[in-house]
Image: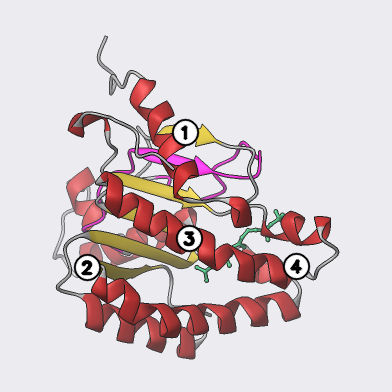
Amino acid sequence: MALPKLKKEEIPNHVAVVMDGNGRWAKKRGLPRTAGHEAGEAALFDVVQGAIQIGVKELSAYAFSTENWKRSPEEVKFLMGFNIDVLRRRRDEMNDLGVKIQWVGRPNRLWKSVIKELEVAQALTKKNKVLTLNMCINYGGRSELIDAVNDIASLVSKKKLKAGSITEKELTKHLYSPKMSDVDLFLRTSGEHRTSNFLPWQSVYAELVFMDVLWPDVTRQTLWDAIEIYASRERRFGKA
Ligand code: FPP
Protein backbone atom coordinates (compact mmCIF):
# COMPACT_ATOMS: atom_id res chain seq x y z
CA MET A 1 0.00 0.00 0.00
CA ALA A 2 1.33 3.41 -0.94
CA LEU A 3 0.38 6.67 0.68
CA PRO A 4 -0.50 9.02 -2.20
CA LYS A 5 1.75 12.04 -2.61
CA LEU A 6 -0.60 14.96 -2.21
CA LYS A 7 -0.30 18.54 -1.04
CA LYS A 8 -1.78 19.42 2.35
CA GLU A 9 -4.63 21.38 0.77
CA GLU A 10 -5.58 18.35 -1.32
CA ILE A 11 -6.34 16.28 1.78
CA PRO A 12 -9.96 16.49 3.00
CA ASN A 13 -10.32 17.66 6.58
CA HIS A 14 -13.55 15.73 7.19
CA VAL A 15 -14.47 12.43 5.53
CA ALA A 16 -17.93 10.87 5.96
CA VAL A 17 -18.35 7.17 5.19
CA VAL A 18 -21.48 5.16 4.47
CA MET A 19 -20.26 1.65 5.23
CA ASP A 20 -22.54 -0.16 2.80
CA GLY A 21 -22.48 -3.71 1.48
CA ASN A 22 -22.01 -5.85 4.58
CA GLY A 23 -25.14 -7.90 3.88
CA ARG A 24 -24.17 -8.58 0.25
CA TRP A 25 -20.61 -9.49 1.24
CA ALA A 26 -21.99 -12.10 3.65
CA LYS A 27 -24.58 -13.42 1.18
CA LYS A 28 -21.90 -14.02 -1.48
CA ARG A 29 -20.18 -16.29 1.03
CA GLY A 30 -23.34 -18.06 2.19
CA LEU A 31 -23.02 -16.44 5.62
CA PRO A 32 -25.62 -14.67 7.77
CA ARG A 33 -25.84 -10.87 7.29
CA THR A 34 -24.42 -10.35 10.75
CA ALA A 35 -21.12 -11.95 9.63
CA GLY A 36 -20.84 -9.09 7.14
CA HIS A 37 -21.16 -6.53 9.93
CA GLU A 38 -18.53 -8.40 11.94
CA ALA A 39 -16.17 -8.32 8.96
CA GLY A 40 -16.88 -4.58 8.61
CA GLU A 41 -15.26 -3.77 11.92
CA ALA A 42 -11.71 -4.39 10.68
CA ALA A 43 -12.42 -2.26 7.60
CA LEU A 44 -13.52 0.69 9.72
CA PHE A 45 -10.47 0.56 11.96
CA ASP A 46 -8.10 0.19 9.02
CA VAL A 47 -9.73 3.29 7.53
CA VAL A 48 -9.26 5.13 10.85
CA GLN A 49 -5.54 4.34 10.74
CA GLY A 50 -5.28 5.30 7.07
CA ALA A 51 -7.05 8.58 7.84
CA ILE A 52 -4.52 9.38 10.55
CA GLN A 53 -1.59 8.48 8.27
CA ILE A 54 -2.75 10.79 5.48
CA GLY A 55 -3.76 13.68 7.74
CA VAL A 56 -7.59 13.58 7.78
CA LYS A 57 -8.75 15.25 11.01
CA GLU A 58 -12.37 14.10 11.24
CA LEU A 59 -14.07 10.88 10.16
CA SER A 60 -17.81 10.23 10.44
CA ALA A 61 -19.02 6.62 10.27
CA TYR A 62 -22.70 5.78 9.67
CA ALA A 63 -22.98 2.82 12.04
CA PHE A 64 -26.77 2.78 12.60
CA SER A 65 -29.36 5.01 10.97
CA THR A 66 -32.78 6.05 12.24
CA GLU A 67 -34.13 3.92 9.35
CA ASN A 68 -32.21 0.81 10.45
CA TRP A 69 -34.91 0.12 13.10
CA LYS A 70 -36.93 -1.26 10.15
CA ARG A 71 -34.55 -4.25 9.88
CA SER A 72 -35.45 -7.60 11.44
CA PRO A 73 -35.52 -7.58 15.27
CA GLU A 74 -32.62 -10.07 15.22
CA GLU A 75 -30.42 -7.80 13.09
CA VAL A 76 -31.31 -4.70 15.16
CA LYS A 77 -30.47 -6.58 18.34
CA PHE A 78 -27.21 -7.79 16.83
CA LEU A 79 -26.21 -4.27 15.71
CA MET A 80 -26.94 -2.78 19.15
CA GLY A 81 -24.89 -5.48 20.90
CA PHE A 82 -22.15 -5.26 18.30
CA ASN A 83 -21.77 -1.51 18.76
CA ILE A 84 -21.36 -2.02 22.51
CA ASP A 85 -18.85 -4.77 21.92
CA VAL A 86 -16.81 -2.80 19.37
CA LEU A 87 -16.68 0.29 21.59
CA ARG A 88 -15.50 -1.80 24.53
CA ARG A 89 -12.86 -3.69 22.58
CA ARG A 90 -11.54 -0.74 20.58
CA ARG A 91 -11.63 2.23 22.94
CA ASP A 92 -8.16 1.76 24.46
CA GLU A 93 -6.58 1.23 21.05
CA MET A 94 -8.36 4.36 19.72
CA ASN A 95 -7.22 6.29 22.76
CA ASP A 96 -3.61 5.21 22.18
CA LEU A 97 -3.85 6.46 18.59
CA GLY A 98 -5.07 9.87 19.79
CA VAL A 99 -8.60 9.37 18.45
CA LYS A 100 -11.42 11.34 20.04
CA ILE A 101 -14.64 9.33 19.90
CA GLN A 102 -17.80 11.36 19.57
CA TRP A 103 -21.36 9.99 19.41
CA VAL A 104 -23.62 11.71 16.90
CA GLY A 105 -27.27 10.68 17.00
CA ARG A 106 -30.69 10.81 18.62
CA PRO A 107 -31.10 9.47 22.18
CA ASN A 108 -34.75 8.49 21.61
CA ARG A 109 -35.15 4.74 21.18
CA LEU A 110 -31.40 4.02 21.26
CA TRP A 111 -30.54 1.31 23.79
CA LYS A 112 -29.40 2.84 27.09
CA SER A 113 -26.55 0.32 27.20
CA VAL A 114 -25.24 1.66 23.87
CA ILE A 115 -25.47 5.27 25.10
CA LYS A 116 -23.61 4.30 28.26
CA GLU A 117 -20.79 2.68 26.28
CA LEU A 118 -20.55 5.74 24.03
CA GLU A 119 -20.29 7.97 27.09
CA VAL A 120 -17.46 5.86 28.52
CA ALA A 121 -15.57 6.04 25.21
CA GLN A 122 -16.18 9.79 24.93
CA ALA A 123 -14.95 10.47 28.46
CA LEU A 124 -11.83 8.35 27.93
CA THR A 125 -10.87 10.02 24.65
CA LYS A 126 -12.16 13.57 25.11
CA LYS A 127 -8.73 15.26 25.18
CA ASN A 128 -7.42 13.55 22.04
CA LYS A 129 -6.57 15.68 19.03
CA VAL A 130 -5.18 13.45 16.28
CA LEU A 131 -8.55 12.50 14.73
CA THR A 132 -12.19 12.91 15.74
CA LEU A 133 -14.18 9.76 15.01
CA ASN A 134 -17.89 10.56 14.89
CA MET A 135 -19.80 7.37 15.58
CA CYS A 136 -23.17 8.10 13.99
CA ILE A 137 -25.51 5.77 15.83
CA ASN A 138 -29.28 6.24 15.63
CA TYR A 139 -28.44 9.10 13.32
CA GLY A 140 -30.75 10.56 10.66
CA GLY A 141 -30.24 13.88 8.91
CA ARG A 142 -33.92 14.77 9.00
CA SER A 143 -34.30 13.88 12.66
CA GLU A 144 -31.20 15.99 13.41
CA LEU A 145 -32.79 19.00 11.68
CA ILE A 146 -36.23 18.40 13.24
CA ASP A 147 -34.68 18.12 16.72
CA ALA A 148 -32.76 21.36 16.11
CA VAL A 149 -35.90 23.15 14.90
CA ASN A 150 -37.84 21.99 17.97
CA ASP A 151 -35.06 23.25 20.28
CA ILE A 152 -35.08 26.60 18.54
CA ALA A 153 -38.91 26.85 18.61
CA SER A 154 -38.85 26.21 22.34
CA LEU A 155 -36.27 29.00 22.85
CA VAL A 156 -38.41 31.33 20.75
CA SER A 157 -41.49 30.53 22.83
CA LYS A 158 -39.48 31.34 25.97
CA LYS A 159 -38.43 34.61 24.32
CA LYS A 160 -34.74 33.59 24.45
CA LEU A 161 -34.51 33.84 20.65
CA LYS A 162 -36.39 36.05 18.22
CA ALA A 163 -38.46 34.52 15.40
CA GLY A 164 -37.06 35.71 12.10
CA SER A 165 -33.54 36.04 13.48
CA ILE A 166 -32.37 32.44 13.16
CA THR A 167 -29.09 32.17 11.27
CA GLU A 168 -27.07 29.21 9.96
CA LYS A 169 -24.79 29.66 12.95
CA GLU A 170 -27.72 29.43 15.37
CA LEU A 171 -29.11 26.30 13.73
CA THR A 172 -25.67 24.66 13.82
CA LYS A 173 -25.56 25.16 17.59
CA HIS A 174 -28.56 22.83 17.93
CA LEU A 175 -27.22 19.94 15.84
CA TYR A 176 -26.23 16.69 17.59
CA SER A 177 -22.56 17.66 17.43
CA PRO A 178 -22.34 21.45 17.04
CA LYS A 179 -18.56 21.33 16.62
CA MET A 180 -18.66 19.01 13.62
CA SER A 181 -17.00 20.60 10.60
CA ASP A 182 -18.45 20.56 7.09
CA VAL A 183 -17.90 17.31 5.24
CA ASP A 184 -15.29 17.60 2.47
CA LEU A 185 -15.38 14.05 1.12
CA PHE A 186 -18.53 11.89 1.29
CA LEU A 187 -17.70 8.27 0.51
CA ARG A 188 -20.19 5.47 -0.01
CA THR A 189 -19.23 1.92 -0.84
CA SER A 190 -21.07 -0.98 -2.52
CA GLY A 191 -21.98 0.80 -5.75
CA GLU A 192 -25.09 2.54 -4.42
CA HIS A 193 -25.34 6.17 -5.49
CA ARG A 194 -27.33 7.70 -2.64
CA THR A 195 -26.60 9.73 0.46
CA SER A 196 -29.40 8.11 2.53
CA ASN A 197 -30.10 10.80 5.13
CA PHE A 198 -26.45 11.04 6.20
CA LEU A 199 -25.21 14.49 7.28
CA PRO A 200 -27.28 16.55 4.79
CA TRP A 201 -26.67 19.91 6.50
CA GLN A 202 -22.93 19.31 6.79
CA SER A 203 -22.50 17.85 3.27
CA VAL A 204 -23.96 20.57 1.06
CA TYR A 205 -20.54 21.21 -0.56
CA ALA A 206 -19.06 17.76 -0.04
CA GLU A 207 -17.47 15.95 -2.96
CA LEU A 208 -19.38 12.70 -3.43
CA VAL A 209 -17.34 9.61 -4.22
CA PHE A 210 -19.04 6.27 -4.81
CA MET A 211 -17.01 3.08 -4.97
CA ASP A 212 -18.08 -0.41 -5.99
CA VAL A 213 -16.21 -2.25 -3.23
CA LEU A 214 -18.33 -3.88 -0.49
CA TRP A 215 -17.58 -2.43 2.94
CA PRO A 216 -15.88 -5.53 4.49
CA ASP A 217 -13.37 -5.50 1.58
CA VAL A 218 -12.42 -1.88 2.28
CA THR A 219 -8.91 -1.04 3.51
CA ARG A 220 -7.05 2.20 4.09
CA GLN A 221 -6.03 1.99 0.41
CA THR A 222 -9.72 2.44 -0.54
CA LEU A 223 -9.78 5.66 1.49
CA TRP A 224 -6.56 6.85 -0.14
CA ASP A 225 -7.97 6.07 -3.63
CA ALA A 226 -11.08 8.09 -2.76
CA ILE A 227 -8.86 10.95 -1.57
CA GLU A 228 -6.96 10.92 -4.87
CA ILE A 229 -10.31 11.28 -6.68
CA TYR A 230 -11.22 14.09 -4.27
CA ALA A 231 -7.92 15.84 -4.95
CA SER A 232 -8.57 15.77 -8.70
CA ARG A 233 -11.88 17.62 -8.32
CA GLU A 234 -12.27 21.38 -8.54
CA ARG A 235 -14.26 22.79 -5.60
CA ARG A 236 -15.83 26.17 -6.26
CA PHE A 237 -18.34 26.61 -3.41
CA GLY A 238 -20.71 28.57 -5.64
CA LYS A 239 -18.00 30.80 -7.10
CA ALA A 240 -17.53 31.06 -10.90
C1 FPP B 1 -24.64 -1.44 5.85
O1 FPP B 1 -24.52 -2.70 5.24
C2 FPP B 1 -24.05 -1.33 7.14
C3 FPP B 1 -24.72 -0.96 8.29
C4 FPP B 1 -26.16 -1.08 8.53
C5 FPP B 1 -23.96 -0.33 9.35
C6 FPP B 1 -23.20 -1.25 10.18
C7 FPP B 1 -21.75 -1.17 9.89
C8 FPP B 1 -20.89 -1.95 10.49
C9 FPP B 1 -21.38 -2.95 11.45
C10 FPP B 1 -19.43 -1.88 10.20
C11 FPP B 1 -18.59 -1.26 11.28
C12 FPP B 1 -18.90 -1.66 12.66
C13 FPP B 1 -19.19 -0.83 13.71
C14 FPP B 1 -19.90 -1.30 14.91
C15 FPP B 1 -18.83 0.57 13.72
P1 FPP B 1 -25.86 -3.39 4.79
O2 FPP B 1 -26.31 -4.27 5.89
O3 FPP B 1 -26.87 -2.34 4.41
O4 FPP B 1 -25.41 -4.18 3.53
P2 FPP B 1 -26.31 -4.55 2.26
O5 FPP B 1 -26.71 -3.26 1.60
O6 FPP B 1 -25.37 -5.35 1.41
O7 FPP B 1 -27.48 -5.34 2.75
**Residue found farthest to the top:** 240
- What is the spatial separation of the Cα atoms under label 4 and label 3, in whole angstroms? 17 Å
Kind of residue indicated by mark 2: Gly
Residue 125 located within the stretch drawn in magenta: no
Give the colouring mode of the picture: secondary structure
Is the residue marked 4 within 8 Å of ligand 1, measured from its CB? yes
- What is the spatial separation of the Cα atoms under label 3 and label 2, in whole angstroms? 16 Å
Q: Residue drawn 14% across and 73% down?
A: 127
Is the residue marked 3 within 8 Å of ligand 1, measured from its CB? yes
User: Which is in the foreground here, disc 1 or disc 2?
Assistant: 2
Which residues fall within the magenta stretch?
177-200
SS for callout 4: helix
Q: Residue drawn 57% across and 48% down?
A: 196
What crowding class fits label 2: few (fewer than 14 Cα within 10 Å), some (14-19), or many (20 or more)? Answer: some
What is the x, y in percent for residue 86? Answer: 48, 78
Q: Earlier in the sequence, mark 4 or mark 3?
A: 4
Residue of label 1: 208
Residue of label 4: 33
Overall secondary structure of the magenta section: loop
Residue of label 2: 98
- What is the spatial separation of the Cα atoms under label 2 and label 4, in whole angstroms? 32 Å
